[in-house]
Image (cartoon, rainbow, N blue to C red):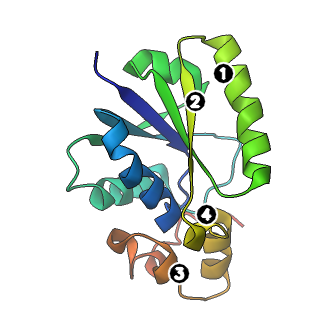
Amino acid sequence: MKRTALFPGSFDPITRGHESVIIRSLPLFDHIIIGIGDNTEKRSMFSIDQRLEWIRETFAAYPAISVEVYTGLTVDFCRSVGAQYILRGLRTSADFEFERSIGQINRKLHPDTETLFLLSLPEYTALNSSIVRDIIRHGGDPDSFVPEALKGKLHHNLSHEKK
């Protein structure tokens, strides 16, 4: 059986921390689907299409990685794409508590889907998409916090920012 994992998130934008967790988990799975959750209730800085493009560029050299957009419950999307695993990165103990609760609910909703946690590398513990967005909003340079494919592109792609 093909081992397929879903790595869900908003990726607004994708960070080097996300990239690290995904690449480091490649030996564990035959296929990793990066699932961009489309939550119409959430304000995004970058459009779904822009995030999709950037993630595809970031992982273009990795044929075992694909990217899809989804709405609704993550476990329902897992069923629809045949993912047996949900992959999550953990930066802090607060992340663990939050992700553990979600993982337990997902397990109750769909007992055949297992949630796996991978610790972030120490250099990415403080990094998240919200911080990158704040850096951009205040005119800072986010390039050292995002994958190579995004470097130099975030400053010019704020047309979808909602204030």
The label on residue 106 is: 1
Q: Which residue is mark 4?
A: 129
Secondary structure of the residue carrying tag 2 is: strand
Residue beneath the point at 34% across and 56% down = 53
Q: Amino acid at mark 4?
A: Ser
State the count of labels. Answer: 4
The label on residue 142 is: 3
Residue beneath the point at 28% across and 32% down = 30
Query: Pointer 2 and pointer 4: residues touching (CB < 8 Å)?
Result: no
Horizontal and vertical percent position of residue 114: 55, 23
Q: Can residue 37 be seen here?
A: no
Q: Nearer the viewer, mark 1 or mark 3?
A: 1
Query: Pointer 4 and pointer 1: residues touching (CB < 8 Å)?
Result: no
Query: Pointer 2 and pointer 1: residues touching (CB < 8 Å)?
Result: yes
Horizontal and vertical percent position of residue 18: 49, 57
Q: Counting other residues with Cα less than 10 Å from the Cα at mark 4, is it few (<14), some (14-19), or many (20 or more)?
A: some
Quick one: label 4 or label 3, which is nearer the N terminus?
4
Q: Which residue is mark 2?
A: 115
Quick one: label 2 or label 3, which is nearer the N terminus?
2
Q: Nearer the viewer, mark 2 or mark 3?
A: 2
Q: Amino acid at mark 3?
A: Pro
Q: Is residue 144 left or right of residue 94?
A: left
Secondary structure of the residue carrying tag 1 is: helix
Q: Can residue 161 be seen here?
A: yes
Q: Counting other residues with Cα less than 10 Å from the Cα at mark 2, is it few (<14), some (14-19), or many (20 or more)?
A: many
Horizontal and vertical percent position of residue 107: 65, 17
Closer to the camera, 51 or 19? 19
Quick one: label 2 or label 1, which is nearer the N terminus?
1
Q: Nearer the viewer, mark 4 or mark 1?
A: 1
Closer to the camera, 46 or 113? 113
